[in-house]
Image (spheres, grey):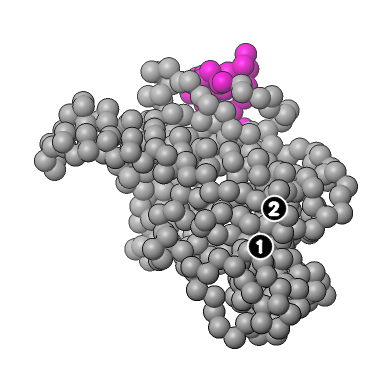
């Protein structure tokens, strides 16, 4: 079986290459904004019409002609896709104007537009950029995205179709409950993901840098001082480091889960709920959403049975006898006690077991849902996770 993945590398462009990349980004940004403007003024051009307009504009303007046609065409393609998604994907807004100050450069090249020679990435217009080859890139990447992050570092992200490595054959099943005290509590304590507090650890350092920024801030419209820019960069670096540590931990943990279990039942966590609570800061620090995405993605790629279980009633249902308690468990009550069979367990552990039990009991139901989603997809709708069966909420059964 094949899978499509991204391989990302750090780029080390020189001053000339950096200027060329930024000039290219300027042209592509102008094109994007032009497309947004056309839509807003009611002309609603299709991708074909936009491409035709691009050809005409390139014939007229030498400024556009100086740029790569591949990058410009890809910009329009990305715009058309974003517009399409804004109608079909829930919560996605219409494509908006990309402002010079508020958007980070991002350029896309298909096979026609880039090559790799002498260990360097070659882009149209004679731009060659040294790449930090931190791991081997499989042959024949189909496209590349060249982008700059908030720290000013440049990266190249190659899209590669590769042979999927078969996951080890295992039988186990695991249930996962997300939380704030422990990021992920599972049915098996050895697989728990503890709250690591990467952002909390560097909070003092970050606050110090933010105070430094505040001291050196100048009035609106005045060029910021060098000291201010330096402090801003350092603050961004600290925040980025914590985010990367979170991503790394989530990857290691998800790999361990996926390697050792055939069935993975995951609480269908809604980050919005915690973001409104008193625990918002800690919940954001734990980056539960990122860990969930990583687990779902890895599980699906490995061909595991991944089931998303709605979180309703999981904490108040006994994992031993299946009885639902009459009253909601307060957040301060850490131990679950069943009134019917007398079973006691740690609150989160019980929830994880209930999640797994629900997924296993509703196997038939889950398949039904999968079918429902398939036909839904054939109806022309796009879903972010179409292959993942979602169980109906427990309350409705
Ligand atoms: Zn019970």
Query: In front here: 389 or 206?
Result: 206
Crowdedness near tag 1: few (<14), some (14–19) or many (≥20) residues, C-alpha within 10 Å: many
* Left or right, residue 65 beside residue 84: left
Tell me which residue sits at (66%, 62%) in the image: 349
Say which quadrant the C terminus sits in. Answer: bottom right
In this view of the protein, can residue 331 be seen by the observer? yes
Say which residue label 2 marks: 189
**Number of numbered discs visible in the structure rendering:** 2
Tell me which residue sits at (45%, 34%) in the image: 241
Residue 276: percent from left, percent from top: 40, 66
> Which of the marked residues, 1 or 2, is nearer the chain's N terminus?
2
Residue 377: percent from left, percent from top: 69, 68
Crowdedness near tag 2: few (<14), some (14–19) or many (≥20) residues, C-alpha within 10 Å: few
Q: Are dots 1 and 2 in contact, CB under 8 Å? A: yes
Say which residue label 1 marks: 349
**Which residue occupies the extreme front position in the image?**
342
Q: Is residue 181 above or below residue 151?
A: below
Q: Majority secondary structure of the magenta segment?
A: strand
Residue 119: within the magenta?
yes
Residue 375: percent from left, percent from top: 74, 73
Residue 216: within the magenta?
no
| Segment colored magenta | 112-132
> Quick one: SS at disc 1?
helix
Where residue 308 sits, quadrant-wise, is: bottom right
Tell me which residue sits at (62%, 16%) in the image: 119
Residue 244: percent from left, percent from top: 51, 37
> Quick one: SS at disc 2?
helix
Ligand 1 has an atom within 8 Å of the beta carbon of the residue at disc 2: no
């Amino acid at each position: 079986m094949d899978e499509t993945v991204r391989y990302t590398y750090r780029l080390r462009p020189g001053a000339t290459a950096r200027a060329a990349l930024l000039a290219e980004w300027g042209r592509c940004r102008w094109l994007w904004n032009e497309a947004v403007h056309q839509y807003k003024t009611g002309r609603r051009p299709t991708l074909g019409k936009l491409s035709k307009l691009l050809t005409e504009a390139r014939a007229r303007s030498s400024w556009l002609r100086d740029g790569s046609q591949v990058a410009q065409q890809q910009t329009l393609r990305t715009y058309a896709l974003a517009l399409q998604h804004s109608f079909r994907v829930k919560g996605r807004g219409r494509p908006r104007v990309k402002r010079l100050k508020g958007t980070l450069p991002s350029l896309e090249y298909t096979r026609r537009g880039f090559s790799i020679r002498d260990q360097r990435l070659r882009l149209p217009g004679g731009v060659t950029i040294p790449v930090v080859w931190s791991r081997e890139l499989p042959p024949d990447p189909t496209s590349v995205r060249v982008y700059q992050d908030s720290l000013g570092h440049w990266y190249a992200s190659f899209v590669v179709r590769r042979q999927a490595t078969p996951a080890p054959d295992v039988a186990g099943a695991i249930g996962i409950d997300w939380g704030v005290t422990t990021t992920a509590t599972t049915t098996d304590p050895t697989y728990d993901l503890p709250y690591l507090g990467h952002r909390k650890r560097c909070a003092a350092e970050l606050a110090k840098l933010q105070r430094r920024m505040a001291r050196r801030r100048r009035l609106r419209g005045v060029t910021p001082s060098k000291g201010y820019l330096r402090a801003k960069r350092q603050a961004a670096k600290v925040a980025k480091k914590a985010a990367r540590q979170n991503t790394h931990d989530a990857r290691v943990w998800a790999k361990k889960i996926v390697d050792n279990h055939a069935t993975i039942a995951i609480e269908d966590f809604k980050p919005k709920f915690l973001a409104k609570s008193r625990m918002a800061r800690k919940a954001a620090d734990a980056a539960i959403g990122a860990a969930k995405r990583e687990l779902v993605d890895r599980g699906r790629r490995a061909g595991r049975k991944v089931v998303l279980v709605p979180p309703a009633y999981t904490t108040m249902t006994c994992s031993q006898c299946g009885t639902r308690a009459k009253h909601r468990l307060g957040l301060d009550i850490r131990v679950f006690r069943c009134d019917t069979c007398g079973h006691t367990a740690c609150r989160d552990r019980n929830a994880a077991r209930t999640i797994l039990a629900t997924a296993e009991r509703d196997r038939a139901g889950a398949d039904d849902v999968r079918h429902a989603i398939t036909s839904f997809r054939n109806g022309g709708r796009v879903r972010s996770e179409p292959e993942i069966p979602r169980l109906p909420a427990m309350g409705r059964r």
